[in-house]
């Protein structure tokens, strides 16, 4: 039928990227939000708060980009990213949540989970990396586990990054063709295209069991990466009752007078070649 648009499985028009947040607007707001994140971090540190943020979603949904923007102005001694590899043989013999418990924050820390214990409800379940019994046990234990964290005083925030099938496929294709981002891909990642509906059912089942009042899920629409980053960070900041902490007063001391120190001759030390100078002197592309 003339004028009829094909829709992707997520209900968005195929081949029509939505309106993107303009870069100047995005960069200005990101700068403001990152300043607030620094204030949040200092409040967490001074008050001994424990904050856990879980980042989940489909492959190529933009989780890594958001985490990078959250942390790039923060102190890595206060804010940690946890991205665990596949479990070892020893970890396979432990309680499933055990290796994640070891990564939880102490007082005054923020921990960002780049994928988390929810691997069991997603990729492990869909790809057959766990048994049906292990999967059912996870769905039963996870809400109990998270209630324990919250009852103990941990601030727990869970974000699910949602991307349409068309946008996901394009992003995976871009990674496949880009040597700088090729490392982000694995055979399991590419399987996400053929397993789209299986992952959708797994996500729905996961939400049905783990979207609890004490630790609700928050969905971030991420076809537009800029909007997703701004929306997620703004929500995180609004969800935590932080206050600006007055910084400790510091003063740059006066440099003391010289006492006769002489720097060793340059030829006694090894310097890296001045590669930058060759670029400045190269006029071939001018």
Image (tube, rainbow, N blue to C red):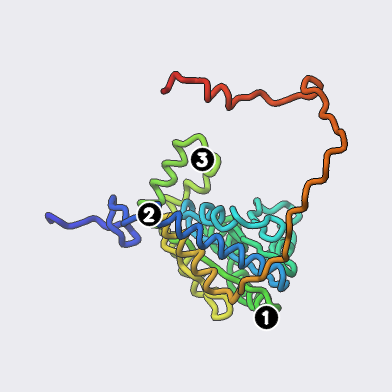
Extreme residue in the front direction: 257
Q: Residue at x 69, y 66 (%)?
A: 247
Residue 196 in view in this figure? no
| Image position, residue 207 (x, y; %) | 50, 71
Confirm whether residue 227 shows in the render.
yes
Label 3 belongs to which residue? 181
Badge 1: residue crowd in 10 Å (few <14, some 14–19, many ≥20)? few
Q: Locate residue 263: give its quadrant.
A: top right
State which tag comes first along the sequence, 1 or 2: 1
Disc 3 element:
loop
Q: Earlier in the sequence, mark 3 or mark 1?
A: 1
On screen, 179 above or below 45? Answer: above
- Between 208 and 76, the residue placed more toward the observer is 76
Residue highlighted by disc 2: 165
Q: Is residue 72 left or right of residue 87?
A: left
The secondary structure type at the circle numbered 1 is helix
Q: Which quadrant holds the N terminus?
A: bottom left
* 99 relative to 18 in the view: left or right: right
Please give left or right for residue 98 compared with residue 81 in the image.
right
Percent of width and height locating residue 71: 60, 56
Badge 2 or badge 3: first in the primary sequence? 2
For the point 52% across and 66% down, the residue is 159
Q: Which residue is mark 1?
A: 151
Residue 97 spot, x, y in % from top left: 68, 66
Nearest to the observer: residue 21 or residue 54: 21
- As measured in the structure, the alpha-carbon distance from the residue carrying label 1 to the one carrying label 2 is 38 Å
Q: Residue drawn at (54%, 74%), measured in percent from left and top?
A: 239
User: Number of callouts in the render?
Assistant: 3
Q: CA distance from mark 3 to mark 1?
A: 40 Å
Asked whether 205 or 255 is in front, the reply is 255
């Amino acid at each position: 039928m003339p004028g009829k648009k094909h829709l992707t499985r997520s209900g968005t028009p195929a081949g029509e990227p939505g309106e993107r947040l303009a870069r100047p607007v995005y960069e200005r707001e990101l700068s403001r939000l990152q300043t607030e994140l620094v204030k949040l971090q200092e409040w967490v540190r001074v008050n001994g708060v424990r904050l856990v943020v879980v980042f989940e979603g489909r492959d190529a949904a933009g989780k890594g980009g958001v985490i990078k923007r959250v942390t790039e102005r923060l102190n890595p001694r206060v804010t940690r990213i946890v991205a665990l590899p596949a479990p070892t043989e020893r970890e396979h013999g432990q309680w499933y949540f055990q290796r994640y418990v070891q990564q939880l924050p102490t007082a005054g820390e923020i921990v960002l989970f780049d994928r988390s214990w929810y691997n069991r409800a997603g990729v492990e379940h869909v790809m057959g990396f766990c048994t049906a019994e292990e999967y059912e046990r996870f769905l039963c234990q996870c809400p109990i586990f998270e209630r324990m964290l919250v009852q103990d005083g941990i601030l727990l925030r869970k974000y699910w990054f949602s991307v349409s099938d068309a946008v996901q496929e394009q992003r995976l294709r871009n990674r496949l063709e880009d040597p700088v981002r090729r490392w982000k891909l694995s055979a399991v990642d590419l399987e996400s295209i053929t397993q789209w509906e299986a992952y959708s059912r797994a996500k729905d089942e996961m939400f049905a069991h783990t979207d609890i009042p004490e630790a609700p899920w928050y969905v971030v629409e991420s076809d537009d990466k800029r909007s997703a980053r701004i929306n997620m960070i703004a929500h995180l900041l609004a969800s935590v009752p932080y206050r600006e902490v007055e910084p400790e007063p510091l003063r740059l001391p006066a440099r003391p007078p010289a006492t006769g120190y002489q720097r060793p001759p340059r030829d006694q030390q090894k310097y890296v070649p001045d590669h930058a100078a060759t670029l400045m002197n190269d006029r071939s592309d001018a």
